[in-house]
Structures are given as structure tokens and as C-alpha cells.
Amino acid sequence: MESNSTENWDREVDVVVIGSGTGQMAAVRCADAGLSALVVEKEKTLGGTTSISGGGIWIPNNYRMQEEGIEDSLEEALEYMKRATFGQSETELMQAYLDNCNDMVSYARELGIEWFIIPMGAFPDYYEAFPGAKTYGRPMLPTTKEPFEGDGAFVGGNLLTKALEKAGRERGVEYLTETPARRLIVDDQGAVTGLMVESGGQEVRIRARKGVVMATGGFSRNEKMVKAFLRAPIYYPNPPAGDTGDGQHMGMAIGADLRNMNESWGWPVFWDPDTENPIPAYAPELGKPGSIVVNKKGQRFFDEAGPYARIIRSFQHFDTDTLEYSNVPAFVIVDSIYRMNYDLAQYQPKMKLPRWISQADTLADLATKLGIDTDGLEETVRNFNEYAKAGKDPEWHRGDSAFDQQTGGDSSRGLANSCLSPLSEPPYYGVAIWPGVLGTKGGLRINQKGQVVNVWDEVIPGLYAVGNCNGSVMGAGYPGGGSTIGSGLTFSYIAANEMRGN
Ligand SMILES: Cc1cc2nc3c(=O)[nH]c(=O)nc-3n(C[C@H](O)[C@H](O)[C@H](O)COP(=O)(O)OP(=O)(O)OC[C@H]3O[C@@H](n4cnc5c(N)ncnc54)[C@H](O)[C@@H]3O)c2cc1C
């Protein structure tokens, strides 16, 4: 009971941000208005998953699009988002996102973070057929006006979190690493007044006069939560070990409502058993001509050149006959022409392949090595080779969309379809792929101000949640590259504005 008392504080600040990924934006923005801001991070280093990411953000009608004369509007973006979140988001959250994401980007520029549109050749919106989708312009990447001194290694997410930290330190934000938050402290009215953190083995009680921003990320590394909440199994998650759902737990403990807990930001991965690292397996490899992805029956089950956010869904198929997730694991199969031209599991063409990638002189032998049905694989390759000759994939429409052509395709080879060529030249190579994640996206239910709402539908005063520890504005979809960091930064910006009173 003592640790929940609203007296005997060890220290006081205006704002505490728990977690140093996208939540850093909230700390910097608060400090800019003269509020004292503290970031507590449980790991030794700052940055979380954000710092190992590509750092891309999805910002409709952004200032770069306007400068380049690319047409977009918030109305189109809202229409698109309503479809692209598959009934699992809320209009007020989507509207808040769209109303603020450009302002957030402009504010980031004031902090010295510039943005450029991901060049043509990558990342059209992920559901191109939906009204309001754009094939170019919304996904942006960060850069800095001034390079970090003597260091060219900062790019993408690493650059983003470093730049935010620099801006924070310049504005007086305090950062405490190896300081896990353990629980929220609430008053008699249920308002959050502070939190208890652990520092050097001691409990430290910190009062937060304006608010606590939960920014602790997802729960992909918490096996119990993954089993309890996600709609289907995931394997080999990419986020760091600290992605354990602490914020969801701290919120649940004080009656916060949850939303979107069945969802994750999925992508397929290879698993390297030697380094024990997941390696992303996505369109720039899978969609190149001369590759297919099959299940144990030897059948294709998605468009290999499509966006990872779409294809990952097909790994969740449950076979009611065999009573298993029949597409897990799946297998990438390529021939030697593919291998001469393209990466496989990020091994460049001339590199020696590791032992966990199988090789055989016939498709039948490769199927046996990988545990795939031989007849099924041979039939699939026969059909696929016919599609390649015709330049048309009647089953999965590979190569039809702008995403396929720009991201997976190879237009330099004069093929009838830039994503299709036959698998005809031995040796053949094959390797398993698994449904992995960039993070989960279910958590504390928030309103349009980023405030956490309790199970009785009331705002919990003093508590905000941003990034993967809230029920994502993106619902069950992934509208475009950068949707996750874009929404994390934007809701951090929104929450900070609320605490600043503007
Ligand atoms: C390889 C890779 C590439 C990616 N590329 C992109 C991309 O280009 N664009 C995009 O939008 N998304 C991308 N993603 C996904 C994206 O990185 C994440 O979804 C996003 O960064 C999550 O941000 P966050 O702030 O919610 O969590 P995080 O960045 O993980 O930050 C949460 C922090 O909270 C800390 N924490 C947890 N519990 C506590 C506690 N109790 N006390 C104190 N601290 C705590 C954690 O240690 C962590 O540092 C990528 C992911 C990966 C793995």
C-alpha cells in the first residue's frame, strides 16, 4: 500500500515518458514548452525497436508531396484508412492522426530532422486497390540537417532516435537508462499522479505533475501474452528483448481498457540458427523473377511480390482438414538463374550459402530435403513456368500491381512480366520462412488526445499511451510503409500538445 501512496515522492517532474522509442517525441515537445521531462528506459541503451528500424514514417499529404506537386488530401487519406484498418480502428483516432501527422513532421524539422520521400521504386501504399491509396509520396525517411559528428553510421531509425535524443538533451530532457518502470501511482479519484521505477535495485517514486506517457512498445517477446492475445502464432520476432508488454500490464493494473490486442505488424522472416537472428523476407527478394514460395503441399499461397503486410495474413490460414496452420513454415524455392542475379536470405549472389539453405539438382530432391510434397512442388513449378512464359500469373496476379513492379520486379531483363521468370536451371535452392513480426500493436485504449480510457469508458487523467503499447490507430491493417513509427511519433506529439495545453 505504501508504494501506491500519493505522498512521499522521491522526486518530481512535469512529465515522465516510459520508454525511449517513438515516445521521445513527447518528451522533446513538452520540454520545448518549458516543462521538465524525464525519459525512463529499462534497457542499457536508448531507442528501443525504433532505433533498429528503417525509420520510415507514413504521412499523407506531407510537405514534400506538396512541394513536388503530388496530389493528395486528408479526405482521400481518411477514406483509404477506413478501408485499410479493416474495421478495427476508430474514426476519431484516424482523424486525429491525419490532422496532426503533418504538423508533427514540421515540428521535427524544427528539431533538425529533415524528411525525404522514399524514392520511386519502393513502397506504394499497401492496399493499392482501395480508394484514396497513393502509389508514391506518403512514406518518408529521416535525415538530419547537420550530420552527427564524425559518424556516418546513423541512418533510418538509429538516426531518428539519436536526433530526438540530441534535441531532447538540448532542451533539458533527462534520460535514465536501466530504470524500468514497475507501476503507476493513482490518487483516490483514479488519476495517475506518478509512477514507481526501479533504479539500482531501489524503488524510486516519481511524481509527474502533468502526466505519464506510456511508450513501452509491444509484447512480441512475452510468450504468455503472445499466446493469450494474438490471432495466430508468430515466430522469431524482430523487436529487442525488452518488448514484453510492461505498459499494457501497468495500464491493466489500474483498470485501463485494451484494444486491438489480436494484432501485430507482421512480416515473414528467415531464421538464421547460427546467429539466432530473424532475417526479413520481403518483396525485394521474394518477388524477384525465378522465385516462388510454397507450403508443405508444394502449393503457392500468395503473391510473392506483394507487400509483407498483406502476405503475412496468409500464414494465419488454419487447415480444417489437417488441423494445423498449413502454411507454417513455408519455403522459398529459387533456381540457379535467380541465384546468379539476386540475394537469397540476404546472401548476395556470389556469397557462399549457409548450411541452413538447402540445395539439390532436382526439384524432387529439394522437396525431399525440405519435407515438401514432391508431386505438389513439381506441378506448381510446371504451372508457374507457363505463367512466366505468358507473363501473367492467373492465380495470384504477381506483377500486376505498382507495388509488385516497383518493389519486387526487375525491369532490366526485358521479361514479359518483371516479376516472373521460369524456375528451370538447376541447382535449385530452398529455405524455410516463418510468420514474424516487427512488433505487436494492441494495447491501452486511447482517445483522440492520446489519453488512456478505462474499462468504464472514462478518461484516466494523467495517463497517455503512444506507439505499440496503445491500441493502434492502424487497427488490423498496415496502410503503408512507416505506419507504425508514423503513428507512434504523431500520437506522442498529440499527447505532448495536450500536456502543454495547446
Ligand atoms: C528491422 C525493423 C525495421 C522496421 N522498420 C520500420 C520502418 O521503417 N517504419 C516503421 O514505421 N516501422 C518499422 N518497424 C517497426 C517499428 O520499429 C516499431 O513498430 C516501432 O519502432 C515501435 O515503437 P515504440 O515506440 O512503440 O516502441 P520501441 O521503439 O520498442 O520503444 C519502447 C521502449 O520502451 C522500453 N520499455 C519497455 N518496458 C519498459 C519499462 N517497464 N520501463 C522503461 N522502459 C521500458 C523498451 O526497452 C523500449 O526501449 C521496423 C521494425 C524492425 C524490427
Image (cartoon, helix red, strand yellow):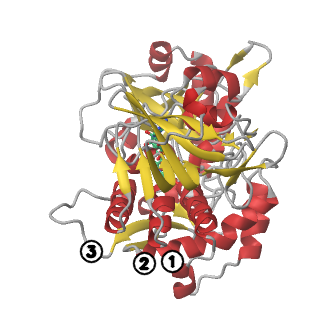
Return the residue found at the far front: 8
Residue 431, position as x, y percentages in the image: 44, 27
Find out whether the residues at labels 2 and 1 contact each other: C-beta distance under 8 Å. Answer: yes
Residue 242, position as x, y percentages in the image: 44, 33
Rate crowding at label 2 as few (under 14), some (14 to 19) or many (20 or more) other CA atoms within 10 Å: few
Rate crowding at label 3 as few (under 14), some (14 to 19) or many (20 or more) other CA atoms within 10 Å: few
**Distance between mark 2 and mark 3 Cα atoms:** 12 Å
**Distance between mark 3 and mark 1 Cα atoms:** 17 Å
Q: Which residue is mark 2?
A: 110
Q: Residue at 40% across / 55% down in the picture?
A: 157
Identify the element where label 3 is drawn.
Answer: loop
Answer with mark 2 or mark 3, whichever residue precedes in sequence.
2
Q: Which residue is mark 1?
A: 106
Return the residue found at the far right: 456
Quadrant location, the C terminus: bottom right
Q: Which residue is mark 3?
A: 146
Q: Is residue 452 visible?
A: yes
What amino acid type is highlighted by mark number 3? Glu
Find out whether the residues at labels 2 and 3 contact each other: C-beta distance under 8 Å. Answer: no
Q: Return the residue nearer the eye: 16 or 377.
A: 16
Q: From this view, report whether residue 339 is shown above or below residue 117.
A: above
Identify the element where label 2 is drawn.
Answer: helix
Q: Return the residue nearer the eye: 438 or 361.
A: 438
Answer with mark 3 or mark 1, whichever residue precedes in sequence.
1
What amino acid type is highlighted by mark number 2? Glu
What amino acid type is highlighted by mark number 1? Ser
